């Protein structure tokens, strides 16, 4: 592929890239893989806590995108469609496993208002998990105590920073349920991490 062609593709929206891919331009698919691999790695790791399985499911997610490319329609955002595929795989895997290890979240909730709680190692990567701090272990243990239904939406909102509307589409939940679960999940995290990070309750 010529550099001019690549320059044209790289400027396209996700939805335009999918349209190009549906028409046979594999390079468009490769650009999407490059764009979303790291984000999905964080998302999947939030469920599994296992770098190897995370890598397997990442590959499976993009394999399904490749195979099912013609089922995608522009009425949906590409990212929503992609996260739905990854989320289904993660939930299926989660049901097969009882032990989970999680990574740091970036924010919690106070009086139903979002605010930032600075946690260490915000650029966490599964491949350097062995070097995580003792505080990270407290965070992981706290996340293990939160129900899957809360953990999923909190990860989507506070780690992936997706809009409430997109989270509702990905999970298939009503907007009110999404917001309620995020607030309840954050509240549980705040309580569990209060002593470790000296979070002030207001």
Image (cartoon, rainbow, N blue to C red):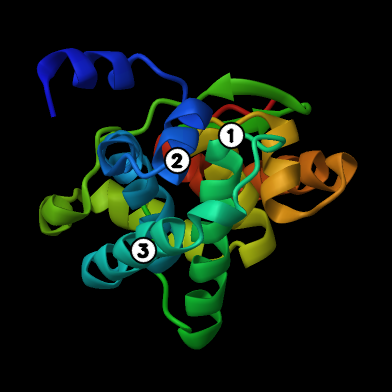
Which residue is at a point 49% across and 27% down the rendered structure image?
Answer: 16
Q: Which residue is mark 2?
A: 105
> Which image quarter: residue 113?
top right
Sequence order check, earlier mark of 2 and 3:
3
Asked whether the residues under the numbered discs 2 and 1 touch, taking CB atoms below 8 Å apart as contact, a structural biologist would say: yes
Which residue is at a point 30% across and 49% down the rendered structure image?
Answer: 136
> Which image quarter: residue 121?
top left
Crowd rating for badge 1 (residues with CA inside 10 Å; few <14, some 14–19, many 20+):
many
Going by the image, does 165 lie left or right of 25?
A: right
Q: Circle 1 — which element?
A: strand
Q: CA distance from mark 3 to mark 1?
A: 34 Å
Q: Which residue is mark 3?
A: 63
Quadrant containing the C terminus is: top right
Asked whether the residues under the numbered discs 2 and 3 touch, taking CB atoms below 8 Å apart as contact, a structural biologist would say: no
Which residue is at a point 13% across and 29% down the rendered structure image?
Answer: 1
Toward the front, the furthest residue is 23
Mark in the foreground, 2 or 3: 3
Q: Which residue is mark 1?
A: 108
Mark in the foreground, 3 or 1: 3
């Amino acid at each position: 592929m010529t550099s001019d062609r690549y320059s044209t593709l790289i400027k396209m929206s996700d939805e335009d890239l999918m349209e190009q891919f549906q028409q046979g331009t594999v390079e468009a698919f490769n650009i999407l893989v490059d764009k979303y691999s790291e984000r999905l790695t964080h998302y999947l790791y939030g469920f599994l806590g296992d770098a190897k399985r995370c890598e397997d499911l990442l590959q499976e997610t993009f394999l399904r995108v490749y195979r099912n490319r013609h089922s995608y329609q522009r009425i949906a955002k590409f990212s929503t469609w992609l996260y739905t595929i990854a989320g289904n795989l993660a939930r299926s895997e989660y049901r097969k496993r009882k032990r989970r290890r999680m990574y740091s979240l970036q924010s919690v909730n106070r009086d139903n208002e979002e605010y930032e709680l600075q946690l260490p190692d915000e650029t966490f990567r599964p491949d350097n998990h062995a070097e995580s701090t003792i505080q990270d272990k407290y965070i992981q243990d706290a996340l293990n105590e939160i129900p899957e239904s809360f953990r999923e939406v909190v990860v989507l909102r506070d780690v992936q920073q997706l809009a409430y509307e997109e989270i509702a589409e990905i999970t298939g939940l009503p907007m009110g349920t999404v917001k309620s679960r995020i607030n309840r999940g954050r509240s549980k995290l705040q309580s569990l991490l209060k002593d470790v990070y000296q979070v002030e309750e207001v």
